Amino acid sequence: MKSLSIQNTGFLAPKVASVSYIGHDTGGADAIFAISGGWNRAYGVTAATTSSLIYNKGVVSISFYLKKIGSPTGTISFQMINASNALVQTYGTVAASSLTTSYVKTTVTGTRQVLGEDFSMIVIFDGGDASNYVSMERQTTGSYDTTNTIMNIKDASNTWSQDDSRDARFEIGYT
C-alpha cells in the first residue's frame, strides 16, 4: 500500500467573488410567451434606463422559467445583446427536449459581462412549430421595476420591439 503525502507549498487558491442574485421571481403567469421559428423567436429583459435594477450588473448567470409544449427539438440559447441588438455574449445553451411540461427555472452560467443601458438578457429558439415550442413564463401585473426593466421581443420577421406592459420571470446572478 502506497501512502500519499500532502505538503503545504504556501500557494493560496484565488479568491472567488460571491454571486448575488436579482430578478422577478413572481409566479402565476397570466399568459405565455411562445418561442419558435414560426412565431416570436426571442424574449428577454432589457435594462431600459440607468435606473433599472439590473443595469450595470456584472452578469455571470441567467435564469428564465421555461417549459416545453409538445416535443420541440433544437437548442435554446441564452444571450446578452447590446442596444443595437447585436450579440455581446452567449452564456450557454439548453436542449429544448430537456425541458419539462411545467415551468422550471432554467439557468446557464457564462463569463462575467456588464449589462449596459438598453442591453438585454434574452432566450432565443428558432426551432419548433405550432405544436412543438418553448414557452417562457410571464405576467402583465406586478411589474418588476416599472418601465426601467422591460421586455425585449424578436418576432418571426426578425424585428425587435420593447414592451413595458409585461415582465418575464427571470433571475440574473452577478458579481
Image (cartoon, rainbow, N blue to C red):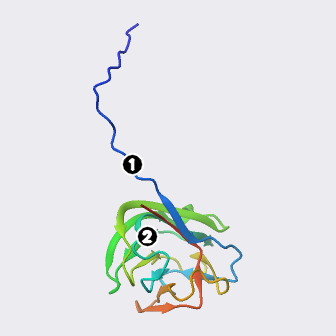
121 relative position to 167: left or right: left
Which element carries disc 2, helix, strand or loop? Answer: strand
- Which residue: 71% across, 76% down? 28
Earlier sequence position, callout 2 versus callout 1: 1
Q: What residue type is labelled 1?
A: Val
Give 57 or 66, whichever is nearer the viewer.
Answer: 57
The residue carrying mark 1 is 16
Which element carries disc 1, helix, strand or loop? Answer: loop
Quadrant including the N terminus: top left
157 relative position to 36: left or right: left
Q: Please, is residue 125 above or below residue 173 in the view?
A: below
Quadrant including the C terminus: bottom left
Does the rendering let one see residue 71? no
Q: Please, is residue 172 above or below residue 163 in the view?
A: above
Quote the CA–CA distance across marks 2 and 1. 26 Å
- Which residue: 67% across, 67% down? 102
Q: Which mark is in front, 2 or 1?
A: 1
Give 66 or 145, whichever is nearer the viewer.
Answer: 145
Tally of marks: 2
The residue carrying mark 2 is 77
In the picture as drawn, the residue positioned furthest to the top comes out as 1
Q: Please, is residue 74 above or below residue 86 in the view?
A: above
Q: Where is residue 126 in the image (x, y as percent from the top left)?
A: 45, 78
Q: Position of residue 61 (x, y in %)?
A: 45, 63
Q: Where is residue 142 in the image (x, y as percent from the top left)?
A: 66, 82
Q: Are dots 2 and 1 in contact, CB under 8 Å?
A: no
Q: Where is residue 64 in the image (x, y as percent from the top left)?
A: 55, 70
Q: What residue type is labelled 2?
A: Ser
Does the rendering let one see residue 106? yes
